[in-house]
Image (spheres, helix red, strand yellow):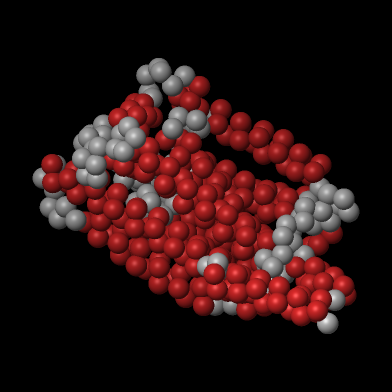
Amino acid sequence: MDTQYANTQYANTQYVIRNRLIPRIEYVLLAVVLALVLIGLMMIFSVTFPLRLQLGKPDPWRDFVNQAMYAALGLAAMGVCARLNYRIWQRLAIPLMVVALVLLIAVLFAPPINNSRRWLFGGSVQPAEFAKFAMIVYMAAWLSSKGEKLRHITYGLLPFAIIVGSVCGLIIIEPNFSTAVLIALCALAMFFIAGADLVQLLLLGIIGSGVAAIVVVNTPYQLKRFMIFLKPLEEGTYQVMQALMALGSGGLLGNGLGKGYAKFGFVPTPQNDFIFALLGEELGLVGTWFVLGLFLLLVYCGFTIAAQTRDSFGQILATGLTFWLFFQAFVNIGVVTGTLPPTGIPLPFISAGGSALVIALIAVGVLISIARANSSEGTYATFDFGWRHRGTRVPRADRRQGVARARG
């Protein structure tokens, strides 16, 4: 009797700690994303307002107001997606993929902007950003439907390569090589998490690396970017070198918000891909560490949500969305710090760009929806990478709950 009473008290204590004292994971994720969006708006205002004033352009608030409008739209979309049952995306996977393919084909016939065809409707919509989300949703639905068949070439490796290759091929033609690589990496990570054989991953890695090398060698501007990375001190590294100088000049605490100098013609289009360098200049090492900490906390929240999810679709979807945001932040910061070749990938939630911001916030809304479903279903699982029994590497919360009931 005493043992039963002690167990009951312990269970009640754990419930209080889990549900009252420790914030629910979706609230932590929401706070992290809101902080990143606010930092992004603050930096875009700090970078663009004085620059537009110096150049004598009308309406110096324009860039900030545009980004704020996209942020409001994205936050509204995030709220709607957070309220939806995430399983609806499984039914929408094929329509989303069809729309993404249509947009990727349509953009190839659009007028070029800066020698590339990446935007529709006068530069307001970037189909490749929508393709990231559509691809992750579709791959989550497709992978979760295959189960153990993924280890067969005809059911796993071959169709996976065709699907990913088709989407990435259309994006490379734009050309947008960096986004194609990002989508391929996310898909490969999801393939692994879903239970793909390591031999399949090795083959895909070899084939993907070979295709990437062929594209780089036969694309002059990509080859130039790669050579800049290999020889950073030679001519042609202006933007990267200025970004590193901006980062270094910030010191520990930075020069102060709005007091940076790199935005005045030293770092081209500083509000876009190299905004992290301006953040380091104005907010210093402490500011960059704070932003890095927020991204790491976002990744922790995403993987925790995936680990607590009951069904394989939700698990793979949450994992894919988290990998996407992580890879994109990692690549952007790697470029700014000179550790990766230059790309055109923006920093999530912070760089200027309406399509990228709205789609990223929608992804967060889906993650919050998955977390809310976990809380309502009382699911608390951990990752099981399945090495011993060669099973899938996603959590099996329902299996653990069944074991717990059997033991009880």
Residue 208: tell me if it is visible. yes
User: Quarter-wise, where is residue 68 in the image?
Assistant: bottom left
Q: Which residue lies furthest to the top in this view?
A: 234
Q: Is residue 199 left or right of residue 178?
A: right
Residue at the spot x=72%, y=35% of the render? 206
Placement of the N terminus among the 4 image quadrants: bottom right
Question: Is residue 348 or residue 27 the one in the foreground?
Answer: 27
336 is higher (above) or lower (below) than 163: above
Q: Position of residue 353 (x, y in %)?
A: 36, 53
Residue 212 point in image, percent of width and height: 61, 35
- Observer-nearest residue: 135 or 377? 377
Q: Nearer the viewer, residue 55 or 278?
A: 278
Q: Is residue 82 above or below residue 111?
A: below
Tell me where residue 403 appears, x and y as whole percent.
Answer: 85, 70
Quadrant hosting residue 89: bottom right
Residue at the image position 88 percent from the left and 75 percent from the top: 406
Can the viewer see residue 154 in this picture? no
Q: Position of residue 237 (x, y in %)?
A: 38, 25
Judged from this view, the residue extending furthest toward the bottom is 1
Residue 274: name its quadrant: top left
- Left or right of 386: which side holds 367? left
Q: In this view, does 255 lie to the left or right of 111?
A: left
Extreme residue in the left direction: 56
